[in-house]
Image: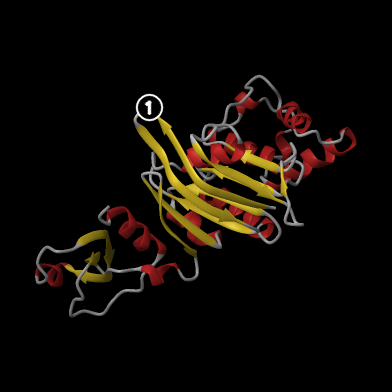
Amino acid sequence: MKIIVKNLEKSFGKQKALDNLSVRFETGIYGILAPNGAGKTTLLRCITGIYEPDSGAVGFVDAQGELCFPKADTIGYLPQKFGIFKNMIVRDFMLYFAEMKAIEKSRQAPEIERCLELVNLKDCLRKKVKKLSGGMIRRLGIAQALLGNPEILIFDEPTTGLDPEERMRFKKIMAQLGKEKTILISTHIVEDIEAVCHKVIILKHGKKQLESSTKNITRNMKSYVYELNEEDLKKIGSDYKILKIYNKNDLLINRIMSREKLPYKEAEAVLEDVYYECMNRDE
């Protein structure tokens, strides 16, 4: 199923969260990359129908190319702030969402088991939700989104609170599901996008700054990236931005971005560099 967003606008008081945003999502994994407050969550809430846009539209197109209205089990959604029923046990929590998605009763138990196993919570069926850690609650949120094997999966900051092992587990699940589903992952963590997404959309102040495949995104760089030691850094003046400082063989290395070509070997650009450039480009 495809999602078509056309000329979307949404404001809260005088603050414009989405500014004439148009984008199309098809089968594959899309990373929506932006700082906090740039419109990521608002976009996802407009797509899921939680928010009504001020203008523009969100449409869904089925495999036959016909406009359609998604059924309850078509979209799996993990919100940024995941409200929970703390006094429920995990099994009843998942049953509640299975009912909400109109999953047949005969399928509910095996489907719940499947989803909990995917996020490594199968042993927590009878544990109360309030006894789960923050990372486990986040994984429970991912599990409820996966219930019913929906065609569209939408995750808002899904890896917040997950340890490195569970973040890797999430990426593996997405890599597998992205071959046949439309998956939207909203985050400000560049590493999550770079590792698993096929396409990247960068937002700033509710506007689309860049849309590209992950493979080709560094071709959009208009600046130059270098990695220089402290001595070389002093020689180039001040017309640069420091992206990162790290230690290499007891030497401080500065990863910098410059709008001018410098007499040093260029470093290979990565998604984080493109993102930084977009966030610092003139409006």
In the displayed structure, would residue 40 be above or below residue 132?
A: below
**Mark 1 packing: few (<14 Cα in 10 Å), some, or many (20+)?**
few
Q: Measured from the top left, where is residue 259 in percent x and y?
A: 22, 68
Q: State the residue in front, 166 or 155.
A: 155
Q: State the residue in front, 236 or 185.
A: 185
Q: Would you name the residue on which mark 1 appears?
A: 13
Q: Is residue 161 visible?
A: no
Q: Residue at x 49, y 65 (%)?
A: 214
* Residue 109 location, quadrant: top right
Element at label 1: loop
Q: Measured from the top left, where is residue 257 in percent x and y?
A: 25, 65
* Residue 168 location, quadrant: bottom right
Number of numbered callouts drawn: 1
What's the amino acid at mark 1?
A: Gly
* Position of residue 223 in the picture relative to residue 269 (left or right): left
In the displayed structure, would residue 270 be above or below residue 105?
A: below
Q: Measured from the top left, where is residue 60 in percent x and y?
A: 66, 47
Q: How is the image coloured?
A: secondary structure
Q: Measured from the top left, where is residue 279 in percent x and y?
A: 32, 53
Toward the top, the furthest residue is 87
Q: Residue at x 23, y 59 (%)?
A: 242
Q: Is residue 55 visible?
A: yes
